[in-house]
């Protein structure tokens, strides 16, 4: 059996598959017309206007977005990833894991990655787990979707996973080799063992697809010498448990709350080197 590549499976089955494999691919989770519109916004924002990628900036793909300007957020992409088919799967997964369907998306849990053409494979993200950034015992799903170009592959960098049920965080590499992200590098010995056991999976991702993977799924950037820039967004979704809400309240970090009915949270931001939330 291979990791699920789903276009029509029931959401409960897909949620179970995340527990088994750590990752699933939802085909056409965002309607193509909407995905193309989001892609056009991203190209305008990051490649034409050269505004900074980073936390939350994907929400500011609006006509008046410019450095040092306050803007009203456009949460269209957040809705596209967190609602609809992908949102149904995430809620089913959290319901299985901890009994709650609602989840939060921290402001710092929104990441846009813009990779230039000709990206050096040696500087691509190494094998790692998102549990290196978020507590391993939180119920979390990362929703990764492509914004540009139309597909990953020879022309644009994609993702590589080791699919399999991991019960805990991997040790970090004691002698890392990555030039800038050494702290994120998983143990080479453990990764080699997992590759021998499960193999690697490089999904072909197209506009409209959403990759859903939990915080224990080992993954890295997959690229050789891409000829096109790639824009992708990661949306970290965390089950809305009391300990999670308390942690963000204690640190004063804003977040969005996603329920079956609505998305609530910050509505304005200021664009600078980082894009900072201003108000709820």
Image (cartoon, grey):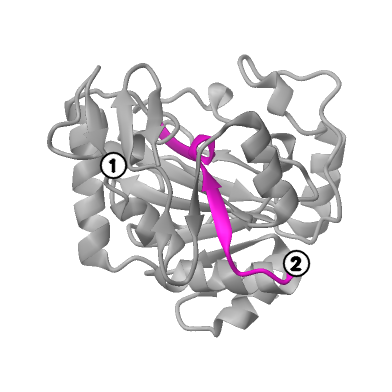
For the record, the magenta segment spans: 98-114
Residue drawn 32% across the image and 57% down it:
207
Tell me the number on the disc at residue 73: 1
Q: Position of residue 189 (x, y in %)?
A: 87, 36
Label 1 crowding class (10 Å Cα cut-off): few <14, some 14-19, many 20+?
many
User: Mark 2 or mark 1, which is nearer the start of the sequence?
Assistant: 1
**Toward which corner of the image does residue 10 lie, by quadrant?**
bottom right
Badge 2 density bin: few <14, some 14–19, many ≥20, Cα 10 Å: few
In the rendered structure, the answer to whether residue 46 lies left or right of residue 238 reads left
Q: Quadrant of the N terminus?
A: bottom right
Horizontal and vertical percent position of residue 75: 32, 50
In this rendering, position of residue 173 left or right of residue 218: right
Work out how far the residue at label 1 is from the one at label 2, CA to CA, in angstroms: 31 Å
Do tag 1 and tag 2 residues touch (Cβ < 8 Å)?
no
Q: Nearer the viewer, residue 89 or 192?
A: 89
Q: Is residue 13 something that shows in the picture?
A: yes
Residue 206, horizontal then vertical, whole percent: 36, 58
Q: Going 70% across and 58% down the picture, which residue do you hit? A: 163
Mark 1 element type? loop
Q: Is residue 33 above or below residue 184?
A: below
Residue reaching furthest to the left: 63
Residue designated by label 2 = 98
| Residue nearer the viewer, 128 or 193 | 128
Q: Residue at x 51, y 58 (%)?
A: 211
Taking the spot 66% from the left edge, 20% from the top edge, the residue there is 178
């Amino acid at each position: 059996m291979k990791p699920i590549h789903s276009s029509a499976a029931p959401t409960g089955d897909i949620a179970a598959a995340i527990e088994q494999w750590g990752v699933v691919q939802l085909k056409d989770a965002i309607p193509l017309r909407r995905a193309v519109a989001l892609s056009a916004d991203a190209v305008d924002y990051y490649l034409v206007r050269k505004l900074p990628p980073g936390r939350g900036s994907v929400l500011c793909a609006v006509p008046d977005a410019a450095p040092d300007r306050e803007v009203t957020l456009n949460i269209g992409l957040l809705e596209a990833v967190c609602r609809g088919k992908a949102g149904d799967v995430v809620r089913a997964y959290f319901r299985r894991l901890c009994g709650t369907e609602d989840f939060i998306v921290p402001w710092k849990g929104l990441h846009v990655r813009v990779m230039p053409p000709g990206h050096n494979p040696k500087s691509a993200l190494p094998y790692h787990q998102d549990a290196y950034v978020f507590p391993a015992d939180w119920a979390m799903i990362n929703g990764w979707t492509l914004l540009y170009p139309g597909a990953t592959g020879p022309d644009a960098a994609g993702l590589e996973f080791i699919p399999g049920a991991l019960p805990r965080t991997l040790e970090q590499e004691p002698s890392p080799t990555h030039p800038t992200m050494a702290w994120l590098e998983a143990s080479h010995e453990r990764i080699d063992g997992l590759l021998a056991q499960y193999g690697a999976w490089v999904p072909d991702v197209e506009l409209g697809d959403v990759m859903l993977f939990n915080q224990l799924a080992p993954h890295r950037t997959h690229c050789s010498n891409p000829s096109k820039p790639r824009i992708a967004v990661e949306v970290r979704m965390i089950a809305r448990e009391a300990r999670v809400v308390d942690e963000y309240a204690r640190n004063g970090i804003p977040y969005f709350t996603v329920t079956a009915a609505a998305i609530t949270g910050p509505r304005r931001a200021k664009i600078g080197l980082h894009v900072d939330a201003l108000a709820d």
